[in-house]
Image (cartoon, rainbow, N blue to C red):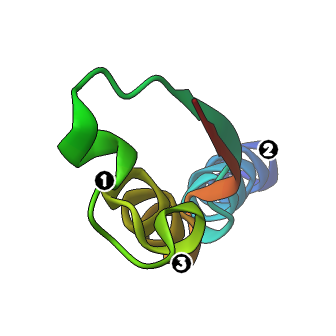
Amino acid sequence: MTAKGKFSVSLILIFILCSFSVPKKTKLNIVFIGDSITFGSGLSMPVSSAPPVHASSYLLQQARYRDVEFS
């Protein structure tokens, strides 16, 4: 294999390895549609313990998302 061929193969391998090594973090916006259960009715602290809050917290723990907003 020529030096140009080795360089091309090395360059391709570097691009492939770099594309898998750093996950792209994205911003996520979610709209929850529901009734009083979705709102957290009956909970002592619906602002911090309603189902959308728990879902958003879980998604933020994933490496894929940098920001999760919900309404």
Report the side of 22 relative to 33 (left or right). right
The amino acid type of the residue labelled 3 equals Gln
Hey, which quadrant is residue 39 in on the image? top left
Name which of mark 1 and mark 3 comes first in the sequence.
Answer: 1
Q: Which residue is mark 2?
A: 4
Report the side of 32 relative to 47 (left or right). left
Q: Position of residue 55 (x, y in %)?
A: 37, 60
Hey, which quadrant is residue 23 in on the image? bottom right
Name which of mark 1 and mark 2 comes first in the sequence.
Answer: 2
43, above or below 68, in the image: below
| Label 1 vs label 2, nearer the camera | 1
Numbered disc 1: secondary structure: loop
Q: Position of residue 65 (x, y in %)?
A: 62, 55
Q: CA distance from mark 3 to mark 2?
A: 44 Å
Q: Position of residue 11 (x, y in %)?
A: 75, 51
**Labels 1 and 2 touching (C-beta < 8 A):** no
Report the side of 9 relative to 45 (left or right). right
Numbered disc 3: secondary structure: helix
32, above or below 37, in the image: above
Q: CA distance from mark 1 to mark 2?
A: 67 Å
Q: Which residue is mark 3?
A: 61
Q: Which numbered marker is on residue 41? A: 1
Screen quadrant of the C terminus: top right
Report the side of 28 relative to 51 (left or right). right
Q: Position of residue 10 (x, y in %)?
A: 69, 60
Name which of mark 3 and mark 2 comes first in the sequence.
Answer: 2
Q: Residue at x 53, y 78 (%)?
A: 61
- Which one is in front, 46 or 26? 46
Q: Residues within 10 Å of mark 3 (few under 14, many from 20)?
A: few
Q: Residues within 10 Å of mark 2 (few under 14, many from 20)?
A: few
| Label 1 vs label 3, nearer the camera | 1
Q: Residue at x 22, y 28 (%)?
A: 35
